[in-house]
Amino acid sequence: MQLTTETEEETKTLAEGLAVALEAGDIISLTGDLGAGKTRFVQGLADGLGIKKPVTSPTFTIIKQYDDGRLPLYHFDVYRLNGPSDLRALGYEEYFFGDGITVIEWGDKINDLLPPDHLTIEFHRTTESVNRRTLVFTSRGQRSEQLKKVLEHE
C-alpha cells in the first residue's frame, strides 16, 4: 500500500492517526533518504501518543526514550551504526520486546534483528514538489497488517 503526502504537516498528521491504534510491542521500521520525513513522522506518532517532550532524531545517541505519553516511545536512529552487532551491544531487546512502541529510523540497516512482525514504511521524495512524499507501507505479520489497515482508512 502507498500513500502520498503533500506537506510535512500531512506526513505528521498521518502518523498521528496511526498512533491511536498502536499498542505495546508494536515495531515500525522507517527507511528513506536523509531529509525524507522519517523524523517528522516520528514526531507525529509522539503527538498522537500524547507525548509533550520535543522529539528530535537520536542520530548521535542512537536511542531516545519518551515516557510522558499513553505508551512509552523508543525512538532509534541506526544510521551511524556499522551493523547489527553495534545494536546488540546497546541491549536493543529490552526496547523491542518492552512495554512501548519502537520506531527505528534507517531500519533497513538492521533487518536481521527486527522481529518477524513489524511494519516497514519507505519514504520516497517525488519530483513534483519539494515537500511531496510517497510512503510505501509493508506489513510483515498479522499485527502489522492490522496497523496497515488503519492507514488504509485514513
Image: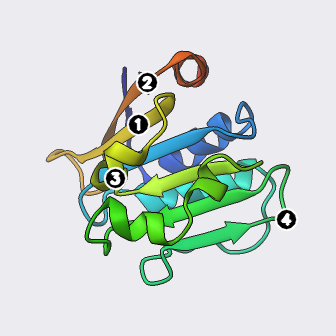
In front: mark 3 or mark 4?
3
Image mark for residue 120: 1
Image mark for residue 40: none
Quadrant position of residue 5: top left
The kind of residue on which mark 3 rests is Ile
Q: From this view, report whether residue 94 is shown above or below residue 29.
A: below
- Residue 145: x, y in percent? 52, 18
The residue indicated by pointer 2 is 140
Of mark 2 and mark 4, the one earlier in the sequence is 4
The residue indicated by pointer 4 is 68
Task: Judge by depth and name the residue closer to the eye, 106 or 148.
Answer: 106
The kind of residue on which mark 2 rests is Arg
Q: CA distance from mark 1 to mark 2?
A: 8 Å
The residue indicated by pointer 3 is 110
Circles 1, 2 touching at the beta carbon (< 8 Å): yes
The kind of residue on which mark 1 rests is Thr
Whether residue 73 sits left or right of residue 144 in the image: it is right
Of mark 3 and mark 1, the one earlier in the sequence is 3
Circles 3, 1 touching at the beta carbon (< 8 Å): no
Dot 2: element: strand
Q: CA distance from mark 2 to mark 4?
A: 29 Å
The kind of residue on which mark 4 rests is Asp
- Residue 126: x, y in percent? 19, 45
In front: mark 2 or mark 4?
2
Residue placed at 75% from the left, 73% from the top?
53
Dot 4: element: loop
